[in-house]
Amino acid sequence: MASIKLKNVTKSFGNNVVLDGMDLDIKDGSFTVLVGPSGCGKTTLLRMIAGIGPQTSGEVYIGDSNVSDVAPGERGVAMVFQNYAIYPTMSIRENIEFGLKNNKVPRETREKLVSTVSKTVGLTEYLDRRPGTLSGGQRQRVALARAMVKNPQVFLMDEPLSNLDAMLRVQMRVELIELHNNLKTTFVYVTHDQVEAMSMADTIILMNKGKIMQKGSPYEIYHDPDNLFTARFMGSPSMNIVECPEGHKMGFRPEHAHLSTSKTEEFLSVKGRIVTKELLGSETIFGLRDAKQDLYRIKEESDYTANTNDDVYFNVPLNHLYFFDSKGSRVRNNDADYKKCVEMVGEMIEEGK
């Protein structure tokens, strides 16, 4: 196991600065997920830790060692790729032990390692088969096994589940969580899928345009966003945002509002018309438009009875409203501007917003 530390790291491609002066600490033994939109720099960051896309400037530490100028194969990391990167003409056994053979590990040691690792990931009965005879999930296990036999300090995973179907992704998420719990090794995992991030990570690093927007637990990222970008990006459906005077914004999560057929005493109670109704098993997501035709999405239990074109009110208590200033930074209830934001919204309500 090992911690990872980046000190004032920059990565440029010609005149294009992808990461600029980044500082980052990843705890030893954590399951850290880098998440963000395409092109935000998360894969560049992962490759920089691996050493296959070295930083332009700054320092990278793995454990107590400065590995800024250390070759990828000597960093004590193992990388699992999106496309598995396994050899189709080799057996599963040969794929798993490929790196060990190259490093001239004795045959007896290789056999023990392959046997132990293949048992851990459920591949024992497939060792003499070719990759083409396996399912996508099984091939991903081969890629994991090949990484595991190196006994790395850090596992680096670049969207390893993106090529799998939805049901298999759920299964593999569980298997990866269990694997991390068993190995107790540092995992750094890249994805653009917020469901993967929320369900797998103990620490999420949300990135945008080469910058870290917020770092925290899944609970903190979702329930206590530092800024408007985090609030909008994390959550499905995303947070409802209301434009306020002076460039301020107010938001609320779809599950924090409730519908009614008449106005309530909640701080925010707005009339709207249902324009969409999405039945998702245990819950229903309603799309509503208010008098200004702004769209809001509200979650209700599946037994809530309402239909498209019905006129209803959505109601949100004050303690479930989020406020953001004109720069997109969060205004919390102990900030000087909080009272001003509440008063702004109160005036909007009085004006019939």
Image (cartoon, helix red, strand yellow):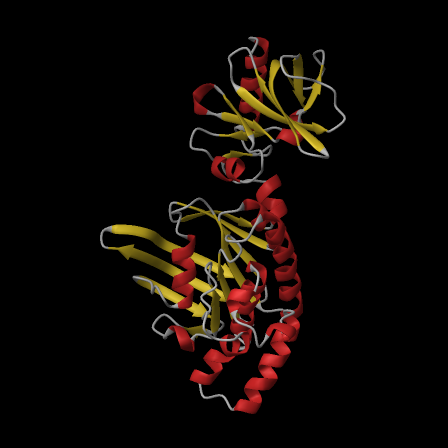
Say how many tags the image has: 0
Question: In the image, is 280 to the left or to the right of 342?
Answer: right
Quadrant assignment, res 222? top right
Question: Is the residue 246 above or below the residue 86 in the image?
Answer: above
Question: In the image, is 46 to the left or to the right of 133?
Answer: left
x%, y% of residue 54? 33, 65
- The residue depicted at 31 percent of the width and 62 percent of the height is 57
User: Quarter of the image containing the C terminus?
Assistant: top right
User: Quarter of the image containing the N terminus?
Assistant: bottom right
Question: Is the residue 96 above or below the residue 81 in the image?
Answer: below
261 or 62, which is in the foreground? 261
Residue 293 visible at all: yes
x%, y% of residue 231? 53, 36
Question: Is the residue 307 above or below the residue 69 in the image?
Answer: above
- The residue depicted at 38 percent of the width and 47 percent of the height is 39
As drawn, which residue projects farthest toward the right?
Answer: 303
x%, y% of residue 99? 46, 79
Question: Is the residue 162 above or below the residue 348 in the image?
Answer: below
x%, y% of residue 91? 52, 75
Question: In the image, is 61 to the left or to the right of 241?
Answer: left
